[in-house]
Amino acid sequence: MSSNQRTIVSFHAHPDDEASKGAATIAKYAAEGVRAVLVTATGGEEGEFLNPAFKDRDPEELPELRLKELARSAEVIGYSEVELLGFRDSGMPNSPANSHPNCFGAVELEVAVRPLVAILRRERPQVLISYGAHQDSYPHPDHLRVYEVAKVARELAADATFAPELGDPHWVQKWYWSLWVRARFEAIGAAIAAKGIELPFRMTERTGDDDLVTTRIDVSATIEAGRAALLAHETQVDPNSPFWFALSPDELASIYPYEEYHLVDAPAGYLETDLFEGLEGS
């Protein structure tokens, strides 16, 4: 990639994570001509059919279906490329899947890191988005590993002594964590509750990342892309879900038109409205 091409690499654990975390942000930047590369660590093999319309389908079909859904979702969002790391879904904490030899959470760290290093060196992004260090509310092994791998891969991608066969060194200038912001949930949740819809207990009890916010992106013009991306994962999302789809894109944009992130190593009190803020040529 040309060093002049604005590029984001967004790193996720499973198919559908790219739709539920930051989809509208990526859609916004893709529409502005930014190259967006999606990296997905696993195939979501430990998932289930969550849409009642698929209740009679063979569970063996699920992995293939999820990858097809991922491709459709990525196209809707505007990703230029999708990279599959090929590891297996680790399943929920303390499940038998945790011990599978190729599960993302169990393979040796360098094995998990090398493909991401290769992608960072080839794509040469200015921005990397992953999950963060604070995941107590949802400690999925693969989500925890995404953070760990992103952290190490960013350092090693810039280290000329590490695996030179993977490409020329590259330093990703800005590393962001996607956040679960309680203020956002409460604003949207109040609007959903006003329609007489009960909120999921797990979300009402979840601790927010509000104190980590450094970056607030206005996604009012691309919220609809996030909804369409979720619907592309038809095995995982019930289109009649009163929670996910109770509010229209226009309602969401009027209630809370932002997606928020934490910029690693930002100084205290730092606030910005653009992932490329402060970068030369932005």
Image (tube, rainbow, N blue to C red):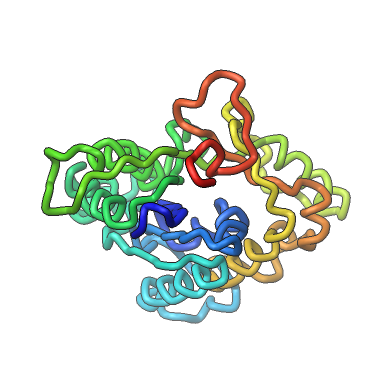
Residue 224 occupies quadrant? bottom right
Label total for image: 0
- The residue drawn where x is 17% and y is 53% is 166
Residue 131 picture location, percent across and down: 45, 42
Residue 130 occupies quadrant? top left
- The residue drawn where x is 45% and y is 73% is 71
Left or right side of 201 for 268: left
Q: In this view of the protein, can residue 87 be seen by the observer?
A: yes
Q: Which residue lies furthest to the top in this view?
A: 268
- Picture layout, residue 193 above or below residue 67: above
Residue 18 picture location, percent across and down: 50, 58
Left or right side of 149 for 55: right
Left or right side of 10 for 95: left
| 88, 6: nearer the viewer | 6
Residue 213 picture location, percent across and down: 60, 31
- Picture layout, residue 197 above or below residue 175: below
| 61, 152: nearer the viewer | 152
| 88, 198: nearer the viewer | 88
- The residue drawn where x is 81% and y is 60% is 250
Q: In this view of the protein, can residue 12 be seen by the observer?
A: no
Where's the N terminus, which quadrant?
Answer: bottom left
- The residue drawn where x is 32% and y is 38% is 148
Left or right side of 90 for 28: right
Residue 175 picture location, percent across and down: 43, 39
- Picture layout, residue 213 above or below residue 246: above
